[in-house]
Amino acid sequence: RAGEAALTQDLLYGLLLKSGNDAAETLAEAAGGSVAGFARLMNARAMQIGAHDSYFANPHGLPDENHYSTAYDLALIFSHAIKNPRFADIVGTRNAALRIETGDGMYSDWRTVSVVNHNRLLTSYQGTIGGKTGYTTKARRCFVGEVERNGVRLVVAILNSPSSGTLWRDARTLLDYGFARYGLASPPALQPEPWPILVQRDLDEDESDFTFDAPPVVARASASAAPVRVAETRSLEP
Protein backbone atom coordinates (compact mmCIF):
# COMPACT_ATOMS: atom_id res chain seq x y z
CA ARG A 1 0.00 0.00 0.00
CA ALA A 2 1.11 3.58 -0.63
CA GLY A 3 3.22 4.96 2.21
CA GLU A 4 4.09 1.59 3.74
CA ALA A 5 7.61 0.25 4.13
CA ALA A 6 9.22 -3.17 4.32
CA LEU A 7 12.69 -4.66 4.47
CA THR A 8 14.22 -5.82 1.20
CA GLN A 9 14.31 -9.38 2.53
CA ASP A 10 10.59 -9.30 3.30
CA LEU A 11 9.87 -7.99 -0.19
CA LEU A 12 11.88 -10.87 -1.65
CA TYR A 13 9.79 -13.37 0.31
CA GLY A 14 6.63 -11.61 -0.87
CA LEU A 15 7.90 -11.77 -4.44
CA LEU A 16 9.07 -15.40 -4.54
CA LEU A 17 6.43 -17.03 -2.33
CA LYS A 18 3.38 -14.84 -2.91
CA SER A 19 4.18 -13.68 -6.46
CA GLY A 20 3.63 -10.15 -5.23
CA ASN A 21 3.58 -7.82 -8.23
CA ASP A 22 3.83 -4.82 -5.92
CA ALA A 23 6.98 -6.28 -4.36
CA ALA A 24 8.41 -6.96 -7.83
CA GLU A 25 7.95 -3.35 -8.97
CA THR A 26 9.25 -1.90 -5.69
CA LEU A 27 12.41 -4.03 -5.88
CA ALA A 28 12.84 -3.25 -9.59
CA GLU A 29 12.64 0.50 -9.03
CA ALA A 30 15.18 0.26 -6.21
CA ALA A 31 17.64 -1.81 -8.27
CA GLY A 32 17.18 -0.30 -11.73
CA GLY A 33 15.82 3.18 -11.05
CA SER A 34 12.55 2.28 -12.81
CA VAL A 35 10.68 -0.73 -14.13
CA ALA A 36 12.08 -0.09 -17.61
CA GLY A 37 15.57 0.35 -16.22
CA PHE A 38 15.37 -2.94 -14.36
CA ALA A 39 14.06 -4.69 -17.50
CA ARG A 40 17.19 -3.58 -19.31
CA LEU A 41 19.29 -5.10 -16.54
CA MET A 42 17.28 -8.32 -16.73
CA ASN A 43 17.74 -8.64 -20.48
CA ALA A 44 21.47 -7.94 -20.32
CA ARG A 45 21.94 -10.59 -17.62
CA ALA A 46 19.77 -13.11 -19.49
CA MET A 47 21.90 -12.72 -22.60
CA GLN A 48 25.06 -13.04 -20.53
CA ILE A 49 24.09 -16.48 -19.15
CA GLY A 50 22.83 -17.78 -22.50
CA ALA A 51 19.07 -17.20 -22.32
CA HIS A 52 18.90 -15.93 -25.89
CA ASP A 53 15.22 -16.66 -26.54
CA SER A 54 13.83 -14.37 -23.85
CA TYR A 55 12.95 -10.70 -23.64
CA PHE A 56 11.65 -9.16 -20.42
CA ALA A 57 9.49 -6.03 -20.40
CA ASN A 58 8.67 -6.07 -16.66
CA PRO A 59 9.87 -7.70 -13.43
CA HIS A 60 6.72 -9.71 -12.62
CA GLY A 61 5.73 -11.45 -15.86
CA LEU A 62 2.30 -9.92 -16.39
CA PRO A 63 1.22 -10.10 -20.05
CA ASP A 64 3.03 -7.80 -22.46
CA GLU A 65 3.34 -8.35 -26.21
CA ASN A 66 7.09 -7.70 -25.95
CA HIS A 67 7.59 -10.01 -22.97
CA TYR A 68 8.44 -13.65 -23.73
CA SER A 69 10.60 -16.59 -22.73
CA THR A 70 10.97 -20.35 -23.18
CA ALA A 71 11.01 -23.31 -20.81
CA TYR A 72 14.69 -23.87 -21.61
CA ASP A 73 15.62 -20.27 -20.86
CA LEU A 74 13.68 -20.25 -17.58
CA ALA A 75 15.42 -23.47 -16.53
CA LEU A 76 18.75 -21.87 -17.40
CA ILE A 77 17.93 -18.72 -15.42
CA PHE A 78 16.70 -20.70 -12.41
CA SER A 79 19.77 -22.94 -12.33
CA HIS A 80 21.86 -19.78 -12.26
CA ALA A 81 19.73 -18.06 -9.59
CA ILE A 82 19.66 -21.07 -7.25
CA LYS A 83 23.41 -20.68 -6.76
CA ASN A 84 22.66 -17.57 -4.71
CA PRO A 85 22.30 -18.75 -1.07
CA ARG A 86 19.60 -16.21 -0.18
CA PHE A 87 17.55 -17.06 -3.25
CA ALA A 88 17.88 -20.79 -2.53
CA ASP A 89 16.81 -20.28 1.08
CA ILE A 90 13.72 -18.29 0.10
CA VAL A 91 12.43 -20.60 -2.64
CA GLY A 92 12.91 -23.56 -0.30
CA THR A 93 10.86 -21.95 2.48
CA ARG A 94 7.32 -23.27 3.01
CA ASN A 95 5.85 -20.16 4.67
CA ALA A 96 6.90 -16.86 6.19
CA ALA A 97 5.51 -13.86 8.07
CA LEU A 98 6.39 -10.44 6.66
CA ARG A 99 6.49 -7.23 8.70
CA ILE A 100 4.98 -4.23 6.94
CA GLU A 101 5.51 -0.80 8.53
CA THR A 102 2.39 1.32 8.25
CA GLY A 103 3.67 4.59 9.77
CA ASP A 104 6.77 6.72 10.33
CA GLY A 105 9.33 6.40 13.10
CA MET A 106 10.91 3.60 15.11
CA TYR A 107 7.74 2.83 17.05
CA SER A 108 5.28 3.15 14.16
CA ASP A 109 2.38 0.82 13.60
CA TRP A 110 2.94 -2.34 11.62
CA ARG A 111 1.08 -5.35 10.37
CA THR A 112 1.99 -8.92 9.53
CA VAL A 113 1.40 -10.50 6.13
CA SER A 114 1.59 -14.30 5.94
CA VAL A 115 2.85 -15.84 2.71
CA VAL A 116 2.83 -19.51 1.69
CA ASN A 117 4.96 -21.31 -0.88
CA HIS A 118 2.72 -22.90 -3.55
CA ASN A 119 5.41 -25.34 -4.69
CA ARG A 120 3.79 -28.69 -3.92
CA LEU A 121 6.99 -30.59 -4.64
CA LEU A 122 8.51 -29.26 -1.40
CA THR A 123 6.28 -31.59 0.60
CA SER A 124 5.74 -34.40 -1.88
CA TYR A 125 8.89 -35.04 -3.94
CA GLN A 126 12.12 -36.26 -2.40
CA GLY A 127 15.10 -33.95 -2.81
CA THR A 128 13.24 -30.82 -3.87
CA ILE A 129 15.43 -27.76 -3.30
CA GLY A 130 12.98 -25.08 -4.35
CA GLY A 131 11.02 -23.58 -7.20
CA LYS A 132 8.80 -20.79 -8.42
CA THR A 133 5.20 -21.04 -9.54
CA GLY A 134 3.42 -18.56 -11.77
CA TYR A 135 0.03 -17.94 -13.35
CA THR A 136 -1.52 -15.55 -15.84
CA THR A 137 -4.53 -16.08 -18.07
CA LYS A 138 -2.27 -16.20 -21.14
CA ALA A 139 0.65 -18.25 -19.81
CA ARG A 140 -1.65 -20.34 -17.60
CA ARG A 141 0.04 -22.39 -14.85
CA CYS A 142 3.82 -22.43 -14.93
CA PHE A 143 6.60 -23.81 -12.77
CA VAL A 144 10.37 -23.99 -12.68
CA GLY A 145 12.27 -25.75 -9.91
CA GLU A 146 15.25 -27.88 -8.99
CA VAL A 147 15.61 -31.25 -7.28
CA GLU A 148 18.73 -33.07 -6.06
CA ARG A 149 19.26 -36.77 -5.40
CA ASN A 150 22.64 -38.37 -4.65
CA GLY A 151 24.50 -35.40 -6.09
CA VAL A 152 22.44 -35.32 -9.29
CA ARG A 153 20.58 -32.05 -9.80
CA LEU A 154 17.72 -31.69 -12.28
CA VAL A 155 15.78 -28.57 -13.23
CA VAL A 156 12.22 -28.89 -14.50
CA ALA A 157 10.36 -26.09 -16.31
CA ILE A 158 6.71 -26.27 -17.39
CA LEU A 159 4.69 -23.57 -19.16
CA ASN A 160 1.06 -23.28 -20.23
CA SER A 161 -0.27 -26.11 -18.08
CA PRO A 162 -4.10 -26.31 -18.20
CA SER A 163 -4.62 -27.14 -14.52
CA SER A 164 -2.86 -27.38 -11.19
CA GLY A 165 -3.22 -31.15 -11.12
CA THR A 166 -1.70 -31.50 -14.59
CA LEU A 167 1.16 -29.16 -13.68
CA TRP A 168 2.34 -31.18 -10.69
CA ARG A 169 1.72 -34.53 -12.35
CA ASP A 170 3.83 -33.49 -15.34
CA ALA A 171 6.56 -32.13 -13.07
CA ARG A 172 6.85 -35.44 -11.21
CA THR A 173 6.76 -37.43 -14.45
CA LEU A 174 9.57 -35.38 -16.01
CA LEU A 175 11.68 -35.61 -12.87
CA ASP A 176 11.09 -39.36 -12.57
CA TYR A 177 12.16 -39.74 -16.20
CA GLY A 178 15.34 -37.77 -15.58
CA PHE A 179 16.31 -39.51 -12.34
CA ALA A 180 15.50 -42.93 -13.82
CA ARG A 181 18.39 -42.41 -16.24
CA TYR A 182 20.70 -42.32 -13.21
CA GLY A 183 18.97 -45.19 -11.41
CA LEU A 184 17.55 -42.81 -8.80
CA ALA A 185 13.85 -43.27 -9.57
CA SER A 186 11.50 -45.70 -11.22
CA PRO A 187 10.72 -44.76 -14.81
CA PRO A 188 7.29 -43.22 -15.40
CA ALA A 189 4.53 -45.69 -16.21
CA LEU A 190 3.74 -45.99 -19.90
CA GLN A 191 0.32 -44.89 -21.09
CA PRO A 192 -1.88 -47.93 -21.88
CA GLU A 193 -2.63 -48.76 -25.50
CA PRO A 194 -6.16 -47.89 -26.63
CA TRP A 195 -8.70 -50.70 -26.30
CA PRO A 196 -10.80 -51.19 -29.48
CA ILE A 197 -14.54 -50.80 -29.00
CA LEU A 198 -16.78 -52.01 -31.80
CA VAL A 199 -19.98 -50.08 -32.20
CA GLN A 200 -22.67 -51.55 -34.44
CA ARG A 201 -25.77 -49.73 -35.60
CA ASP A 202 -28.57 -50.47 -38.02
CA LEU A 203 -28.58 -48.87 -41.43
CA ASP A 204 -31.15 -46.28 -42.40
CA GLU A 205 -33.55 -47.23 -45.20
CA ASP A 206 -31.72 -45.10 -47.76
CA GLU A 207 -28.43 -46.85 -46.84
CA SER A 208 -29.74 -50.42 -47.16
CA ASP A 209 -28.58 -50.87 -50.76
CA PHE A 210 -24.89 -50.45 -50.04
CA THR A 211 -22.36 -51.15 -47.34
CA PHE A 212 -18.92 -49.81 -46.56
CA ASP A 213 -16.40 -49.74 -43.76
CA ALA A 214 -16.25 -46.41 -41.95
CA PRO A 215 -12.80 -45.06 -41.01
CA PRO A 216 -11.82 -45.47 -37.37
CA VAL A 217 -12.20 -42.50 -35.04
CA VAL A 218 -9.98 -41.97 -32.04
CA ALA A 219 -11.72 -40.34 -29.08
CA ARG A 220 -10.37 -39.19 -25.72
CA ALA A 221 -13.03 -38.95 -23.03
CA SER A 222 -11.06 -36.64 -20.76
CA ALA A 223 -7.53 -35.49 -20.02
CA SER A 224 -7.10 -38.15 -17.35
CA ALA A 225 -8.90 -41.01 -19.08
CA ALA A 226 -7.10 -43.57 -21.20
CA PRO A 227 -7.47 -43.04 -24.97
CA VAL A 228 -10.21 -45.12 -26.57
CA ARG A 229 -10.34 -46.18 -30.21
CA VAL A 230 -13.91 -46.20 -31.49
CA ALA A 231 -14.34 -48.15 -34.71
CA GLU A 232 -17.73 -47.80 -36.35
CA THR A 233 -19.08 -50.84 -38.21
CA ARG A 234 -22.29 -51.11 -40.18
CA SER A 235 -24.59 -54.08 -40.50
CA LEU A 236 -24.18 -56.06 -43.70
CA GLU A 237 -27.81 -57.05 -43.66
CA PRO A 238 -30.62 -54.63 -44.56
Image (cartoon, helix red, strand yellow):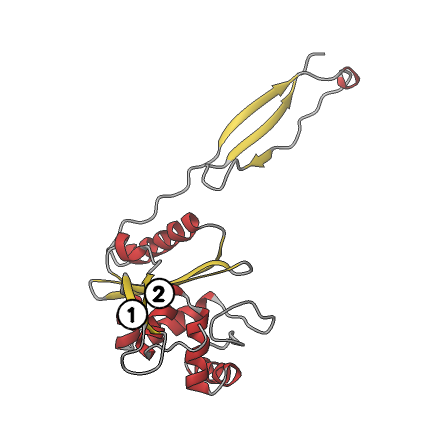
Q: Amino acid at mark 2?
A: Leu
Residue 155 visible to the viewer: no
Q: Which class describes the residues within 10 Å of circle 1: few (<14), some (14-19), or many (20+)?
A: many
Q: Is residue 181 left or right of residue 74?
A: left
- Element at badge 2? helix
Asked whether 144 or 173 is in front, the reply is: 144
Q: Which residue is mark 1?
A: 90
Image quarter where the C terminus lies is top right
Image quarter where the N terminus lies is bottom left
Q: Could you tell me which residue is drawn at 26 percent across and 59 percent down?
A: 182
Q: Which class describes the residues within 10 Å of circle 2: few (<14), some (14-19), or many (20+)?
A: many
Task: Tell me residue 103's x, y (percent).
Answer: 36, 77
Q: Which residue is mark 2?
A: 17
Q: Earlier in the sequence, mark 1 or mark 2?
A: 2
Q: Are marks 1 and 2 in contact (CB under 8 Å)?
A: yes
Q: Is residue 202 left or right of residue 129?
A: right
Q: Could you tell me which residue is drawn at 25 percent across and 65 percent down?
A: 152
Task: Tell me residue 52's x, y (percent).
Answer: 49, 77
Residue 212 visible to the viewer: yes
Task: Tell me residue 150's x, y (percent).
Answer: 20, 62
Task: Report which quarter residue 74 is drawn in.
Answer: bottom left
Q: Could you tell me which residue is drawn at 44 percent across and 80 percent down?
A: 28
